[in-house]
Image (cartoon, rainbow, N blue to C red):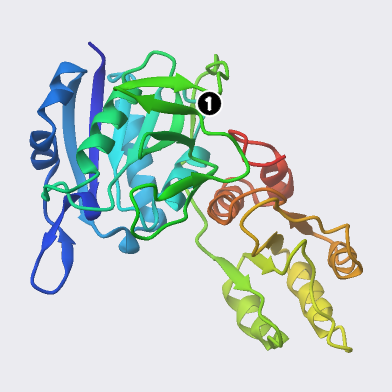
Amino acid sequence: MKRILFIATGGTIASKNSGSGLTPVMTSDDLLACVPEIAETCRVDAVQLFNLDSTNICARHWLEIAGAVERNYETYDGFVVTHGTDTMAYTAAALSYLMQDIAKPVVLTGAQKSAYLRDTDARRNLADAFAFASDGRAFGVNVVFDGNVILGTRAKKTRTRSFNAFASIDYPDVALMRDGKPFYYLTDAKPQTAPCFYRAMNEKVFVLKMIPGLSPNIFSYLNEECDGLVIESFGSGGLPDYDNDEFFFRLKEFTARGKTVVCTTQVEREGSALDTYEVGRKLLACGNVLEARSMTLEATVTKLMWALAADRERVGELFESPVRHDIF
């Protein structure tokens, strides 16, 4: 039987009503006790890294999860991480950049309802996650949820209440879990090189969501506080000129300070295309502006955090190099 390390971090799946709302209190052992059939699938050891609502999870927690995998990589055949759904897509993307070329599976899962409840998706998601982590063909960072296996770089939470909460954006699912077995849609070859673990993220990244009439004075803050900027623009992408080109002047000032700008779109699917319209071409002409194209916002943000920390001189090259089908 495969040896799987269970890394519990909290989330709805581990929550009970505290009297002031749901809060994570169930431990990794409590969760395993809810699904005793997991013991028939694999041998499990468990570690409780923290027990948080995923709203409170940020880069230091991503690094802690990646560190737990790195320390135990040679000992276990796979890893299952339980996590709150609200920021699971950010964590899945971040782990995809922090742990590259891994030939073993790291599976994130959670639930829309607590494992403590009778009417819950938690038990199926847990069972599927361990089954997939135990499959010899599985590798890399994936989200397993509601029977779907999704690349960590393509996952997005698209529903707040329904059990089918996650979707793969602009890319096929990796596999479908049926009766405890994965049926693969994608059959990429496992990496043959040694895994590469990174141990830093630059959190000085800001997401600027454009709205009609937004003042370019926001750059007074951005210039002082941020090393990287993700602009969530309208449609195919671009910046407004509002008859004075102030946004473009302020953006050029920002990049002249050695800071990086990435343009993405507020539209969930089909990505940006900055060369389509004049407002997009003017943005590209500013220089040192990267384009996220088909990347999810979660992947865009975490990849920029990773690239800024990995090598400030090669941010553009690192960002535009595909990792687990994140950009094309």
Estimate the x, y position of residue 178 in percent, counting from the top left: 35, 24
Q: Residue at x 17, y 62 (%)?
A: 23
Please, is residue 50 above or below residue 43 in the view? below
Q: Nearer the viewer, residue 86 or 317?
A: 86
Where, quadrant-wise, is the C terminus in this rendering? Answer: top right
Q: Amino acid at mark 1?
A: Asp
Please, is residue 44 above or below residue 153 in the view? above
Q: How many marks?
A: 1
Please, is residue 106 above or below residue 153 in the view? above
Estimate the x, y position of residue 10 in percent, counting from the top left: 22, 51
Q: Residue at x 24, y 48 (%)?
A: 9
Mark 1: few/some/many CA within 10 Å (<14, 14-19, 20+): many
Horizontal relation, residue 306 to residue 65: left or right:
right
Helix, strand or loop for disc 1: loop
The residue under label 1 is 101
Where, quadrant-wise, is the N terminus in this rendering? Answer: top left
Q: Residue at x 64, y 66 (%)?
A: 229
Estimate the x, y position of residue 257 in percent, counting from the top left: 73, 69
Horizontal relation, residue 14 to residue 325: left or right:
left
Q: Quadrant of residue 59?
A: bottom left
Estimate the x, y position of residue 38 in percent, counting from the top left: 17, 25
Q: Residue at x 33, y 19 (%)?
A: 74
